[in-house]
Amino acid sequence: MMNRGTPSHAITGAFVFLLLGIFAVFSTVMVLMGAKAYRGTVERSDANNTARIASSYIRSMLRSDDEEDVLTIEEIDGIGMITMVNNYGGDSYITRLYVYNGSLREYFADAEMEFDPEWGEKVCEAESMQAEFKDGLLSVKITANGVESEVLYAPKAGITEGGN
């Protein structure tokens, strides 16, 4: 007599198919978990990079304009800013660093021009900036992408508080 359809082959085929299905499901889960971890890493890296860009930019601007009676901390229309006034060829020019509408901005113009915060060039994203002179240092706290960083700068030429 002939044996019809051996059950062992049917069970073996179903078992292999089940293993392939489990492998496919776990592979998909692992890819999704890896993508989520990668996305989180990229987001944290972007936030830290923006904070570093903002603090590095402020530090380099302060270093480039560290001359006698150039640096001032002031507030115009409720916006705190670092102001630097320089003379080039007998004309006075003003540079202002401030945060406005979610961006660290730089405003450079003739010192006689009226200030409008919209005119500032966007440097990078930032939520806030506070500058103060304390213990012989200029302290600038800037928050960018939720990361707060502080620039402590010891001006060689001194600093004044208030407007020009």
Image (tube, grey):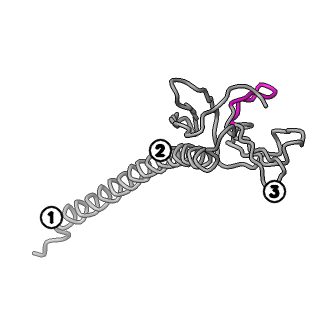
Residue 115, numbered circle? none
Residue 72 at x, y percent in the picture? 69, 33
1 or 114, which is in the foreground?
A: 114
Under mark 2, the amino acid is: Arg
Q: Secondary structure at mark 3?
A: loop
Identify the mark nearer the N-term, 1 or 3.
Answer: 1
Would you identify the image quadrant in which residue 134 lies? top right
Q: Residue at x 72, y 38 (%)?
A: 83
9 or 142, which is in the foreground?
A: 142
Task: Tell me how many marks there are.
Answer: 3
Tell me where the magenta segment starts and ends, as one range.
73-82
Identify the mark nearer the N-term, 1 or 2.
Answer: 1
Asked if the magenta segment contains residue 74, the reply would be yes
Q: Secondary structure at mark 2?
A: helix
Residue 8, numbered circle? 1
Under mark 3, the amino acid is: Gly
**Majority secondary structure in the magenta region:** strand
Residue beneath label 2, please? 44
Asked if the magenta segment contains residue 51, the reply would be no
Quadrant of the rendering where the N terminus is positioned: bottom left
Under mark 1, the amino acid is: Ser
Identify the mark nearer the N-term, 3 or 2.
Answer: 2
Residue 97 at x, y percent in the picture? 69, 41
Q: Residue at x 22, y 64 (%)?
A: 10
Whole-angstrom CA distance, mark 3 to mark 2, is 45 Å
Q: Nearer the viewer, mark 1 or mark 3?
A: 3
Residue 89, numbered circle? 3
Whole-angstrom CA distance, mark 1 to mark 3, is 96 Å
